[in-house]
Image (spheres, helix red, strand yellow):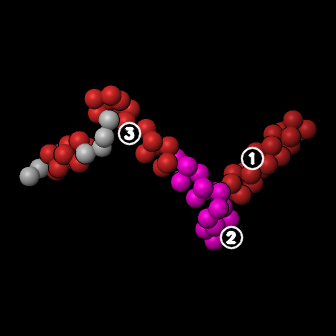
């Protein structure tokens, strides 16, 4: 059996095909997005989370912009 046939059979198992069509998969994407957000906020890799790095880079860009204006 081909992989695409297996995938089609697996996707047919998700309920709501007649009523919702392709949109029946939206709850899975919402849960996946929430899980990714939780991971980026709470899981530390080394000593930093994703948001620690984001805030640091943002403040570095702001500092560099202020230095360019001041020069």
Residue at horizontal 65 percent and vertical 62 percent from the top: 42
Per the image, is 23 magenta? no
Dot 2 or dot 3, earlier in sequence: 3
Secondary structure mostly taken by the magenta-highlighted segment of the chain = helix
Magenta-highlighted residues: 33-50
Towards the viewer: 34 or 54:
34
Residue at horizontal 87 percent and vertical 35 percent from the top: 69
Q: Are there few (<14), some (14-19), or many (20+) residues within 10 Å of tag 1?
A: few
In the displayed structure, would residue 35 be above or below residue 47?
above
Measured from the top left, where is residue 17 in percent x and y?
29, 33
Measured from the top left, where is residue 16 in percent x and y?
32, 35
Towards the viewer: 63 or 58:
58
In the displayed structure, would residue 45 be above or below residue 27?
below
Per the image, is 41 magenta? yes
**Marks 1 and 2, Cα distance to the nearest angstrom?**
18 Å
In the displayed structure, would residue 18 be above or below residue 27?
above
Measured from the top left, where is residue 1 in percent x and y?
8, 52
């Amino acid at each position: 059996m081909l992989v695409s046939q297996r995938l089609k059979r697996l996707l047919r198992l998700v309920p709501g095909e007649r009523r919702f069509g392709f949109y029946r998969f939206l709850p899975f994407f919402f849960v996946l997005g929430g899980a990714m957000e939780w991971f980026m906020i709470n899981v530390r890799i080394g000593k930093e989370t994703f948001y620690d790095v984001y805030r640091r880079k943002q403040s570095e860009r702001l500092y560099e912009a202020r230095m360019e204006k001041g020069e």
